[in-house]
Amino acid sequence: QLQLVESGGGLVQAGGSLRLSCVASGFTLRGYAIGWFRQAPGEAREGVACSSSYDSTTYYADSAKGRFTISRDDAKNTMYLQMNSLKPEDTGAYYCAATQLMTGQKLCVGSIRNYWGQGTQVTVSS
């Protein structure tokens, strides 16, 4: 079964940090663009941080620049999102996604995503 499974969400105070993980099973992440998306209540899902399938280039939403870092460990078939200096507006459900042969920017702002995780909730209290 091809799937992505997130973990690492939770409740954290403003200024704190969390690291999200997303493990792929049934396929290898090598050759896939990977990304993290956030969906706040009542809002559309938006790309937060994405990484290209072709090289190490990354794309970050303006809200994430300087605070979030996306990474991958192909040996563990896992992607990560390190989130620092968290703000209440970072609250939402976080989803990982993967798509073959794509740049990070296109994954984050485009409409094609081959695989989605089930989501993990991040709540930042003020």
Image (tube, helix red, strand yellow):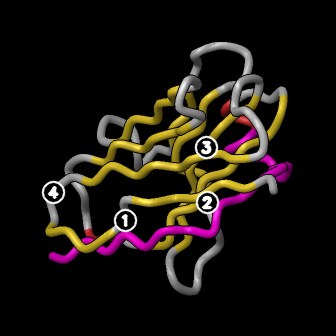
Question: Which numbered marker is on residue 16?
Answer: 4
Which residue is situated farthest in the top direction here?
55
Disc 3 + disc 4, Cβ < 8 Å: no
Percent of width and height locating residue 65: 39, 38
Residue tagged by mark 1? 9
- Frontmost of labels 2 and 4 is 4
Question: Which numbered marker is on residue 35?
Answer: 3
Q: What element carries label 1?
A: loop
Segment colored magenta: 107-126
Residue toward you, 80 or 45:
80
Upstream in sequence: badge 4 or badge 1: 1
Disc 2 + disc 4, Cβ < 8 Å: no
Mark 3, other Cα within 10 Å: few <14 / some 14–19 / many ≥20: many
Question: Residue at coordinates 77% horizontally, 23% vertically from top-left?
Answer: 31
- Please determine whether, in this image, residue 45 is positioned above or below residue 28: below
Upstream in sequence: badge 3 or badge 1: 1
